[in-house]
Amino acid sequence: MHLNIVTAADDIQAAWPVFKPAVNPATLTHKQLLRGEFWRKIPAYADVDEQTFLDHAWQARNSITRVERLFATVQGVASQEFLSDVARGFNSSPMSVRLSPYLVSLIDWSRPYEDPLRRQFIPVQSRLLADHPRVGLDSLNEQGDAPVPGLTHRYADKALFLALDRCPVYCRFCTRSYAVGVDTDEVEKVNLPANTQRWRDAFAYIASRPEIEDIVVSGGDAYQLRAGQITEIGDTLLAMPNVRRIRFATKGLAVMPQKIVTDEAWRDALVQVVEKGRKLHKEVVVHTHFNHPNEITWITERATDLLMERGVTVRNQSVLMRGVNDSVETMTRLIKRLSHVNVHPYYVYLHDLVKGVEDLRTTLATALHIEKNVRGTTAGFNTPTFVIDAPGGGGKRDVHSFEYYDRETGISVFTSPAVQKGALYLYFDPLHALSRSALRRWQDPVEQEAMTRAAIARARRLDRPFSGVARGVAGKSRLHVEDRAWP
Ligand code: SF4
């Protein structure tokens, strides 16, 4: 039978010589997942067998939060010079540090400065850059839209429920560094513990608002909820007639897939909420957060296979980061590898204006370029939408929907009529991507104000959708009188 298929394929090639030649399977790199006991190359894990490495409790117990522990773990594979740089980076980071052994094993310690996973999770002093003058701690103004602590109600029909403030790992670029993790030298965090009274207030608010249909359960990270808490939250929300959709948000699959594989109680609790929702004709799904193809290994595949078998839909939201996934090649491989393990690539976010991670931010122009080249490489339903979460609370906007974008000053202006009519939302490209003359202007507070005002004025004058003229040519204004401009 196999031979017949090969013969048929050869016949097709012979009959239609201009037909696309079959690609060499070796070039389909998105299918080539890391296999074997890859963790054993790390000195501290050299004697760890597969059963132990797959144990979620072992992963949690051996997660690294202190620099001394990191040193002991990678001593011999990372250089002393690099480790000293890390020690200084730990002290000046606004974000807590927490690394799972899984993550530590996936970093190329012979090239740690360039490694895309190291860049996301381990700060090094020598690579930190001064913050853009317009970055802030809660750049999305989540607290400003929170009727009760830990519940953000911005879009009319959707609420974001921050059930807790702990995660299986801590990401340097976290938008919620104002609350997530423990206090650091730089930041005293807003407290959002998994507290029953706080949850009751959040549930009461959701139940009181008939317009809310969609709940994102996040944090922190739903991975850190106990199985019983998953059930409690799921059952409570599903019992509300107004709630039609629930999303459990967890980065866990990307940083500790072992939990799905070996924490049966947690996995069963999630699956039961999904099944209960299905019987009620309500959708319950998982939203996760992969940023680089190296995060997807045979262990991830085993975890996503288990979720697929139990009928759990998983969608992915990535953050576009410099030196991590800001190339067409890497982003394409990420998207195709996600699809390969049955995770739908849903969103790619432009990096939020977060403190302490200017080295990771990239430009709106980069997002536009990558989106243009990625679209068409795979099916449309597996192609993510590239968005910007409009600073100040405008919500997600398609990156192409800017009213005005000045590539010289790096200022882009967005509107969000369904969230706040008349408001303008400003995004700022990182200073390291600007010309010297623009950089000089950003160093002068008077010039900062002038550039910002000029961008707002241009955005007000432009009428891109109706004029049909090129950007930058003034037309009839479609913008309403500005109530406010963020940030
Ligand atoms: S897992 Fe999510 S919430 Fe937690 S630190 Fe990372 S980005 Fe922030």
Image: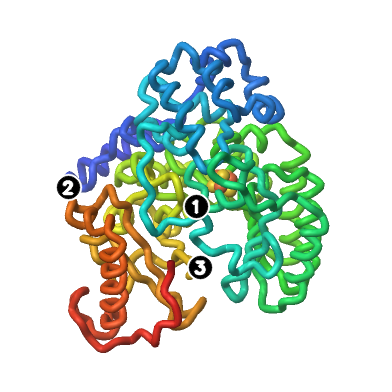
Q: Is residue 146 visible?
A: yes
**Residue type highlighted by circle 3:** Gly
Q: Mark 2 — residue?
A: 18
Q: Are marks 3 and 1 in contact (CB under 8 Å)?
A: no
Q: Mark 1 — residue?
A: 317
Pointer 3 residue Cβ closer than 8 Å to ligand 1: no
Q: Mark 3 — residue?
A: 393
User: Gap between marks 3 and 1, in whole Å?
Assistant: 18 Å
Q: Nearer the viewer, residue 90 or 312?
A: 90
User: Gap between marks 3 and 2, in whole Å?
Assistant: 52 Å
Neighbours of disc 3 within 10 Å: few (<14), some (14-19), many (20+): many
- Give x and y (percent) for residue 286: 62, 52
- Give x and y (percent) for residue 73: 55, 18
Q: Quadrant of the C terminus?
A: bottom left
Q: Nearer the viewer, mark 3 or mark 2?
A: 3
Pointer 1 residue Cβ closer than 8 Å to ligand 1: no
Q: Is residue 1 visible?
A: no
- Give x and y (percent) for residue 379: 39, 55
Decide which of tag 2 and tag 1 comes sooner along the chain.
2
Q: Which mark is residue 54?
A: none
Mark 2: secondary structure: loop
Q: Nearer the viewer, mark 2 or mark 1?
A: 1
Q: Quadrant of the N terminus?
A: top left
Q: Residue at x 77, y 59 (%)?
A: 199
